[in-house]
Amino acid sequence: MNRLIAWFTPEPGSRVHEIIQQGRSPRMESVHLLWSAWVFVTPLFDRGYTWRWALITALSYPVFVALFAKSMLVSRATASRYGMGLAMFGILLVPFYSGSVSYFIYGCVSCSLSSRRLTPFLLRLVMLNTLFLLIASQVGYAWQALVAFPLMTFIIGMVTHVERIGHEKDAALKLSHDEVRRLAATAERERIGRDLHDLLGHTLSLITLKLELSRKLFDRDTEAARREVLEAEKVARHALAEVRCAVTGFRATDLAAELASARLLLESSAVQLDYGQPPCMPVEIERALALVLREAATNIARHAGATQASVSFETVDGGLCLAVADNGRGGIAEEGNGLSGMRERVRGLGGRLQIHSMRGQGTRLRVVVPLPAALAAAASVPAGTLDTLPQAVEARR
């Protein structure tokens, strides 16, 4: 029993293991077995359902399922062996069993699991189909079948091969995007630490010195000690204002990290991204726009076919506008889950989202969200320009 369980356990690097890593259910792959229903249909076009057919089916179908399942469960390096074995199993049954063609096609398609390289896969298909044609022609297959079956193996095999490569690229893109975001967040935390040290280090040292001086002067010169305490209080209030201002700037941290992530993501797809620094904004707006930007950048990398993209921020009638544009193929016919999620997220903030996508003219996404009145004037100032914001911050208090 343990050997049977181990035999059907997915190995690292297998097709099922990759599907699990991508967050998908491996049970979905079992849908491909539905095509094996042709095994039970082909007798209608041959000699009918005979005892001989039933016996061969009862013996061969479990072997077919086991070989196909094993090709999905073993590592890529050995998957082709089971695919080749399944195809050869079908070829050996050609003289005796009409359903053997289904086994043969499954085996040929399973050979695509062994490598992302197309040439080895095509060589295996040519070799297997040549052997199949030699035996099938001797058995007396019609010429239409001798043309159709090899053609089916090439078409289905190529579609499966290209589809699998697409899934692998999407998974690699997701991992790359997550890694870029993690590195950007780490760099942003380090920047915040340096800024806080530069901001408070000197000020707190000055407050400490003045309080020590006031303590020493307390018994000898009460008036001088009082002046030092008042000066320390002024320095502390000034430091408090600077910290409030800095925190206002740090609220754009997630959006700034997402911009850096988007730039690296698009550069990996040969897309040049130009962008400006995000302005100060409430944290809930900043988080929502960061998610919108992430989805927009992912769509450009995957679907736009663009070479240039831009991200800009501006204030419009007391609101904040985020615009994302690219020079890709355009022509978005319908909104997928990503765009629908963007629209719902923006609507939840009381904003609006517009998409202009003419075929051959790229795509422009424009998001406008309302800002609190106290922030509307300050929103046009970059988050990094902190020395001009203390008055605005104090006004908010």
Image: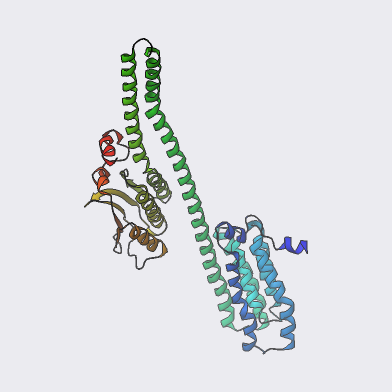
Residue 52 vs 240, above or below: the answer is: below
The correct choice, above or below, for 382 with respect to 362 in the image is: above
Left or right, residue 266 beside residue 316: right
Closer-to-camera residue (228/262): 228
Residue 126, position as x, y percentages in the image: 59, 67
Which residue is the extreme one toward the top? 220
What is the x, y in percent for residue 344?
Answer: 37, 61
Q: Nearer the viewer, residue 4 or 304?
A: 4
Q: Is residue 110 left or right of residue 199?
A: right
Return the residue found at the far left.
Answer: 317
Determine the image quadrant of residue 188.
top left
> Measuring 31% from the left and 50% from the top, which residue is drawn there?
310
Name the image colouring: rainbow
Quadrant of the snapshot with the N terminus:
bottom right
Q: Is residue 70 above or below residue 147?
A: above
> Closer to the camera, 158 or 299?
299
24 displayed left or right of 392: right
Report the number of discs.
Answer: 0
Please name whichever residue, 29 or 83, is drawn nearer the observer in this view of the structure.
29
The residue at 34%/65% (across/down) is 332
Residue 367 on image: x %, y %: 30, 56
Pick the quarter of the image with the C terminus: top left
Residue 78, quarter of picture: bottom right
- Residue 230 lies, with reference to residue 109, above or below; the image says above
Q: Position of residue 4 (x, y in %)?
A: 75, 64
- Give residue 69's quadrant in the image: bottom right
